[in-house]
Image: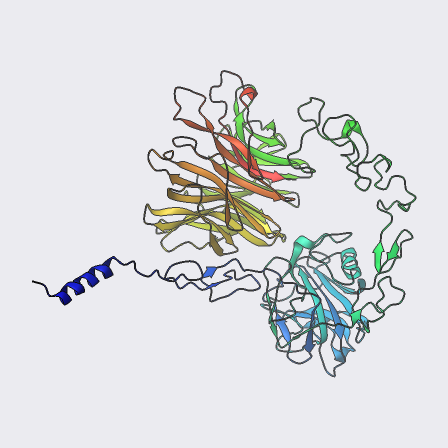
């Protein structure tokens, strides 16, 4: 017989066994019992945290807190920019304010060796520049003035007169030399320093470096923008914003890092230079429109109403000649010069908008002047102009489908209108420049080819396929593969990459400086498929998970410089061993993308296309999945795209057994996102309702549109919907 105390003990034990255990606390990533360190994991970001293990979305590429600049002590202060100047062409520019300092060398933007841009006191503080020990190749005959903000610049063009160096002050050329050898390799570029010292004494603001020699007119344009270079914005004579290597506005106002406004992630590290701002700064010229009577220090913001049609209103210049025809708007009956008077013009300040008198859906001023016979293209010849998918732009898509004669051929669509590519089995990529359409694919003879408009050009290499095309400086580049390996073709000449059958190339891009990048894969000695890129033929592997592999399918460039590669890597999976994970790499840093599309078992995802719109990264692809029996369709794939790592599921996935949808490419312009691929359609055969079929389509801002119609092909073609859309380009 149990004692009462023993009985109570047993009861307590039983109760304790049924009590729910206290839940483990969540870490900053929301993982129970985890130890994640949250922060910015992008090494190119301004606020990169090297200790962070989980990216919390806080990354900042550029920081602007107002009007600041840096003060340099003339002794040991500087900003380390890293490796910025190669052995080719460049431009360096900055705003500077010099103090007098005995024996100060006053370096502005110089290297640890190889190149210098400075105003040494020993030379009378005359602006100077040079290479490789001869640092007075060019020199201003006059000194940089003391205590006055001055715009300075130096350009070097390796391709002109055996190397031409030109020096500018306040937008005006002051010296030039030819026969200048390229700079020796300098691994570091500094603001306010050369080598181990030689520092600037005074203020520096608005530093920019380009990987080309800007023109005289561009330098003048930058210098005339008095309050800021505004180097990321093309305007007037300045057209080189995409050639920026780095642009440091120096408006952080705190901390020891300079963010890079160019978007290239070249963060500067500040050493002993100090932040400065000025409450007493403003325009000190009484003749300026924005004269500030309280300002005691001029900050180069003065603006003047020099044009006869300009007016100074409350300290701001108000333009009064919109079309720049010399007639002020208050006297001009046609302010936008479209030959429609302002009183009947729907938009008197836009020469492409005025009316639609003929009622064809297109503005009569589409061409820039009133002309109902030329108010937009009429591809189908119905007397009505095309309806544009995106107002003011043309959208091109490439793939293959049936034509009106029942032949399955390569083609492209311009704003939905089909254009056949002669002699083509399928087409894979498209590029458009000034209305000329470049496409690539595979011909009817199973060999690689490309088309310029509708003229086909065959490419050498047996059993080849052309996967990607681009045009740079008039040269046509095509990436692909042939029977014995990966390659690319330049103007029809084949250039081999990896010469074995275990290598393929799928994407191509040309950097601003002419470097050729090709993306794909190769197989290593352990028979892993390794994602990689080739730069000018030299192969570099990209990171994969431990024991995994992957492929690169597409390439994009941020401002023509920073490289993005899209594809997939294999990730460990408890369900299937290894499954693909959609991935993109920025330069060499890998980002794995989230899955989507189904609540059930996920087989994996693949990224096929990548594009950039500003700093936004878009990747197109799909997620494979397996549905629960008798609950969901049995399987297939869902089309989707990712914007900055956030997934956007698209309609057109499985409708029934093994239906599928895939997004192959993506472009974004003017706030519009266009994705192309294939989407599921219902089976046209009522006897096989379980069957599913795919058709070429596009998604405009998430809305599904099919590119083929049952009545576009002969009625005897049963599966008229069979088609693919593989690439997209927005002009």
Residue lying furthest bottom in this view? 102
Horizontal side of 629 relative to 147 (left or right) equals left
Please identify the quarter of the rendering in which residue 89 is found. bottom right
Horizontal side of 49 relative to 332 (left or right) equals left
The foreground one among 133 and 23 is 23
Q: Is residue 304 above or below residue 348?
A: below
Q: Residue at x 71, y 25 (%)?
A: 384
Q: Is residue 604 above or below residue 91?
A: above
Q: Position of residue 125 (x, y in %)?
A: 77, 76
Q: Position of residue 592 (x, y in %)?
A: 45, 52
Colour setting: rainbow
Q: Position of residue 511 (x, y in %)?
A: 60, 51
Q: Is residue 554 at all visible to an observer of this figure?
A: yes
The foreground one among 77 and 332 is 332
Horizontal side of 583 relative to 306 (left or right) equals left
Q: Is residue 504 at all visible to an observer of this figure?
A: no
The C terminus sits in image quarter:
top right
């Amino acid at each position: 017989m149990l004692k009462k105390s023993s009985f109570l003990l047993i009861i307590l034990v039983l109760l304790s066994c049924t009590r729910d255990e206290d839940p483990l606390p969540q870490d900053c990533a929301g993982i129970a019992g985890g130890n994640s360190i949250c922060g910015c994991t992008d090494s190119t970001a301004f606020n990169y945290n090297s200790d962070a293990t989980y990216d919390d979305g806080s990354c900042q590429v550029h920081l602007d807190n107002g009007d600041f600049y840096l003060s340099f002590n003339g002794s040991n202060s500087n900003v380390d920019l890293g490796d910025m100047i190669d052995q080719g062409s460049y431009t360096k520019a900055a705003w500077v304010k010099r103090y007098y300092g005995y024996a100060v060398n006053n370096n502005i933007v110089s290297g640890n060796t190889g190149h210098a841009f400075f105003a040494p006191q020993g030379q009378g503080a005359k602006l100077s520049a040079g290479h490789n020990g001869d640092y007075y190749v060019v020199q201003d005959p006059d000194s940089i003035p003391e205590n006055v903000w001055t715009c300075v610049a130096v350009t070097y063009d390796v391709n002109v007169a055996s190397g031409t160096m030109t020096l500018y002050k306040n937008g005006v050329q002051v010296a030039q030399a030819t026969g200048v050898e390229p700079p020796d390799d300098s691994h570091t570029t500094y603001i306010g320093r050369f080598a181990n010292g030689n520092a600037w004494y005074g203020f520096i603001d608005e530093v920019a470096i380009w990987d080309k020699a800007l023109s005289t007119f561009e330098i003048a344009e930058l210098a005339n923008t008095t309050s800021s270079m505004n180097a990321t914005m093309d305007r007037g004579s300045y057209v080189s914003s995409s050639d920026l290597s780095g642009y440091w506005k120096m408006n952080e106002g705190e901390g020891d890092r300079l963010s890079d406004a160019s978007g290239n992630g070249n963060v500067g590290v500040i050493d002993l230079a100090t932040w400065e701002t000025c409450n007493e700064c403003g325009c000190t010229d009484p003749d300026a429109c924005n004269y500030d009577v309280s300002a005691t220090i001029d900050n180069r913001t003065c603006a003047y109403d020099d044009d006869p049609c300009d007016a100074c209103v409350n300290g701001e210049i108000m333009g009064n000649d919109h079309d720049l025809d010399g007639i002020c708007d208050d006297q001009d009956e046609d302010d936008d010069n479209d030959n429609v008077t302002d009183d009947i013009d729907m938009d008197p300040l836009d020469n492409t908008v005025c009316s639609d008198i003929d009622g064809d859906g297109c503005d009569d001023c589409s061409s820039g002047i009133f002309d109902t016979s030329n108010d937009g293209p009429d591809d189908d010849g119905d007397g009505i102009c095309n309806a544009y998918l995106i107002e003011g732009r043309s959208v091109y898509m490439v793939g293959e489908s049936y034509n009106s004669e029942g032949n399955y051929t390569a083609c492209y669509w311009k704003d939905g209108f089909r254009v056949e590519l002669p002699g083509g089995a399928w087409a894979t990529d498209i590029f458009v420049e000034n209305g000329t359409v470049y496409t690539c694919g595979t011909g009817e003879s199973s060999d690689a080819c490309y088309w310029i408009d509708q003229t086909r050009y065959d490419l050498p290499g047996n059993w080849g396929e052309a996967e990607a095309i681009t045009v740079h400086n008039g040269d046509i580049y095509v990436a692909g593969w042939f029977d014995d390996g990966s390659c690319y073709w330049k103007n029809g000449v084949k250039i081999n990459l990896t010469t074995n059958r275990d290598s393929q190339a799928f994407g191509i891009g040309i950097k601003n400086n002419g470097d050729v990048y090709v993306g794909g894969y190769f197989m290593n000695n352990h028979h892993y498929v390794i994602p990689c890129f080739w730069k000018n033929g030299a192969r570099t592997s990209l990171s994969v998970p431990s024991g995994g592999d992957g492929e690169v399918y597409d390439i994009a460039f941020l401002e023509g410089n920073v490289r993005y590669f899209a594809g997939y890597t294999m990730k460990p999976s408890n369900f299937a061993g290894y499954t693909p994970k959609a991935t993109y790499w920025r330069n060499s840093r890998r980002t794995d993308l989230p899955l989507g599309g189904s609540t059930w078992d996920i087989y994996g995802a693949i990224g096929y296309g990548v594009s950039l719109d500003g700093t936004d990264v878009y990747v197109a692809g799909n997620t494979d999945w397996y549905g629960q029996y008798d609950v969901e369709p049995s399987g297939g794939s869902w089309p989707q795209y990712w914007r900055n790592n956030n997934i956007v599921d698209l309609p057109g996935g499985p409708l029934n057994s093994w239906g599928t949808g895939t997004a192959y490419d993506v472009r974004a312009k003017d706030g519009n996102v266009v994705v192309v691929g294939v989407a599921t359609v219902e089976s046209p055969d009522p006897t096989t309702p379980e069957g599913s079929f795919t058709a070429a389509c596009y998604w405009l801002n998430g809305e599904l549109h099919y590119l083929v119609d049952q009545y576009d092909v002969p009625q005897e073609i049963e599966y008229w919907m069979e088609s693919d859309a593989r690439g997209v380009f927005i002009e």
